[in-house]
Amino acid sequence: MKAYLGVGTNIGDRMKNLQDSIDALNLLPLTIVTDVSNVYETDPVGFDNQDDFLNIVVEVETDLNPDNLLGACLGIEAGLGRVRTIKNGPRIIDIDLLLYENETSNTQTLILPHPRMMERNFVLKPLLDLNISHSIINKDDVFKSLTDDGVRFYSAKDKLCLNK
């Protein structure tokens, strides 16, 4: 199954944090990173008194179900040192499950597609870099929702290694 993950960081060596998250995703059982967007530097949202973020969207092929993939992403965050103290505050890594194949979910633990995805330029811009094919989210709809507010190109995706 194909899934899309939003990854962001604003603490420490941000490029290394992104690479570490890709490496960790590739270590998951039955999962491989197949594509990654360009890297964008973005203004913080929700809590302004913090450094800017680097954001990417990662495409993975996985046989993990959505709940297990979400749990694995939370485990990667913890393994990389994420501590949740301030809502929308600074974080070493944040991995959000945005889309999973053509599935929808609305449970206490998982909403798919991600409920605020279409409101977040830091997700939409990198998502447009990838060749998304999804029956629920149309690439044209993503493009229509996008503005350039707070999102700046930072680095080409070739600065990140998909598989080591």
Image (cartoon, rainbow, N blue to C red):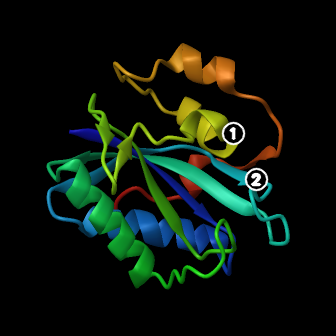
In the picture, the quarter occupied by the N terminus is top left
Where's residue 94, x and y in %? 53, 65
Is 20 situated above or below 152?
A: below
As helix, strand or loop, the secondary structure at mark 1 comes to helix
What residue appears at the point 44 percent right and 27 percent down from the top-left corner? 131
In the rendering, at what x and y percent does residue 91 appear?
62, 74
Horizontal side, residue 38 vs residue 95: left or right: right
Q: Compared with residue 95, is residue 85 higher up or lower down, i.e. above or below? A: below
Q: Residue at x 28, y 28 (%)?
A: 102
Contact? badges 1 and 2 (CB < 8 Å): yes
Determine crowd level at label 2: few under 14, some 14-19, many 20+ residues with C-alpha closer than 10 A: many
- The image shows residue 123, relative to residue 70, as above or below, that is above
Q: Is residue 86 left or right of residue 34?
A: right
User: Residue at left 49%, top 85%?
Assistant: 81
Is label 2 in a helix, a strand or a loop? strand
Q: Residue type at mark 1: give it.
A: Asn
- Which residue lies under the disc numbered 1? 121
Q: Nearer the viewer, residue 97 or 19?
A: 97
Query: Can I make out residue 164 in this image?
Result: no
Q: Residue under circle 2?
A: 42
Q: Nearer the viewer, residue 7 or 130?
A: 7
